[in-house]
Image (cartoon, rainbow, N blue to C red):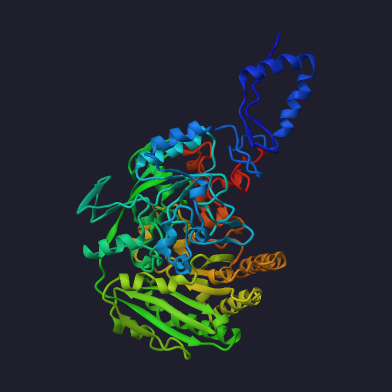
Amino acid sequence: GLVLVFIGPLYRPSGWRVATVNMLGLLATAFIALAADVTAAAAAVATADPFGQRCRCVPAADGTLPPCWTEADWDGLNRSVGGRLIGRDSLLLPSETTGNSSLLTDFDYLTSQPGFTFWRGYSGRWDQRTARSEYAVLAENAADIQAAVRFAALHRLRLVVKGTGHSFQGKSSAAGSLLLWTHRLRNTQWHERLEVCGKEYEHPVVVAAGSQFSQTHEEANQRGRMEMAGLCPSVGFSGFASGGGHGIFSRSYGTGASSIIQAEVVLANGSLVLATPCNEFADLLRAVRGGGGGTFGVIVSLTYRTFEQPRSVGTIQAQMAVSDLTEMSLVTQEFLNSLRENVMSKGMLQHLGGNLVLQPLLKRITLRMAYVGISSSECAALFSNMTNHMKVDCVPAKSWIDVAVLNKTQLGSMANGRWLSFMNRYFTESVFDTEQSTATFSNGIKRIFELNPRRLEGEHSQLHIMLHWGLSGASDTALQNFTHTSMNPAVAESVGVIMWERMLPDTFFLAGKEESQSTHAQMQEDEARTLAWADQLFGEGAGSNVNVAGCNVPDWQRRFWGSNYPFLLSTKDKYDPQGLFFCSNCVGSDRWTSDGNCRMPLV
């Protein structure tokens, strides 16, 4: 008798990535194969599919379009989203849209263009010029998102989700993909009171997927409220909060993830669900609270807790010139010692946030911090003898917005640059134990700069000691709410994060320059040495913040989420078993090739 075996989708490594199967042709082939060699035919198909799992349907490297969609299919999607589907020719890059170079560092402009990302790319990992989507849905409502998700699942497309495009790792960019752009979902809804699962929240706000801090800050301020948000006003709530999200006052009020009360999410099957702490989607809500954006579904809206405006806030400012790395290390150690003796020993860390910025190329150190819940005189007492080299000023502010958000001048020099290296690591109170431990820490930071010599004229490098990206010494409220998130538990024990940055600014590229292959290779070696050194300095198990991580993060599952990763992976399998939602170094991404297009072979 004749036994027909359906092998599944056929693959051709050159030309089309995925070919559909003609069942009549398959029947005919099966009969012919009986006279030839059925075993050889099956072996040939297996050879053509080296991954042993299905691949996504994307254009081939030479631009050849795959046969798993037709123009009629796209026309149907366009009709279902109200004509808001655009093709790659309309997904313009910054250099293709304006001759006004000032717009290319304007974060409002950059985030309002569907084809843009906030950064040019990350050297050797992704480039906005080549990571261009084939089509984009400019979503304006939940139904648009549902239509795009169902279409991507039906046609096995590479789907990317973008709100503002701030990802250092290029998570919202992929060549040949369908882009789901949520930036136009910007409505907000404020409640006087809202009861969720028997708990009453005062003045929560429902923020749609495209809402940005710059939009809601003033709304909150007018109502006498404050929200947990990051320093950059162009960042969106969805990515910030779902990745954890630390604000300058996180030690007093908690993280962005712990501010999420409930979430509306479109799942991989296209259904729209409301995840609350007490319904059948409670596990999904916990995953969204810190498990990373674009992973478990598409966030349509978040119900976000707000807080009564603090009565007393202000800035903590200082800047000094340093002659070399040795002096920079000395001042850093003095600052850490003073922080231990004058702030941490008095239990006052929860009232402070901000960072110490080390910029040896500019020969300066800058203290950018803020205080909350204490007076300016109390702040001044804490910093009265902070260091022998630096005079610190505590300046009262009219509003929390004045201290919690960076302005365009502070941000503009970084927008549209290309990252060369980026790394962050959590550090604990052990850094502050003794004079020797602060010396080791400060000299270790000095070593990071020594491992990254300036290789190109115009490149920027700096290191931040972020003192609000940990919850050690935080308020009881902040710590209690943190337990309901899926963030790395190490955050609760961390004082902060060191964040290393190295980039080529927009001005480098406007001058018509590009990094050479040899320079690129040298910088990759610099980054590898820096990562190895960070493991020596902080320990191989040191955690890392997912929202501001570079592309090269060894053991990212453990570093980003610690003991919460198994829960996140099982939740991913439950709600997205086919892996429709993929992004680099996101939950479950290690099962796919680096471009997210083919599943890795099972072992």
Nearest the eye: 588 or 484: 588
Q: Name the residue rendered at 57%, 48% in the picture.
A: 175
Nearest the eye: 461 or 446: 461
Vertical arrangement, residue 271 with respect to residue 167, above or below: above
Left or right, 315 with respect to 530, comes to: left
Q: Position of residue 582 (x, y in %)?
A: 53, 45
Q: Position of residue 504 (x, y in %)?
A: 58, 69
In the rendered image, which quarter is residue 477 located in?
A: bottom left
Q: Name the residue rendered at 24%, 73% in the picture.
A: 311
Left or right, 217 with respect to 322, comes to: left
In the rendered image, which quarter is residue 470 located in?
A: bottom left
Spot the residue most to the right: 36
Q: Is residue 253 visible?
A: yes
Left or right, 196 with respect to 601, comes to: left
Q: Position of residue 301 (x, y in %)?
A: 34, 48
Spot the residue most to the left: 192
Q: Position of residue 182 (x, y in %)?
A: 40, 49
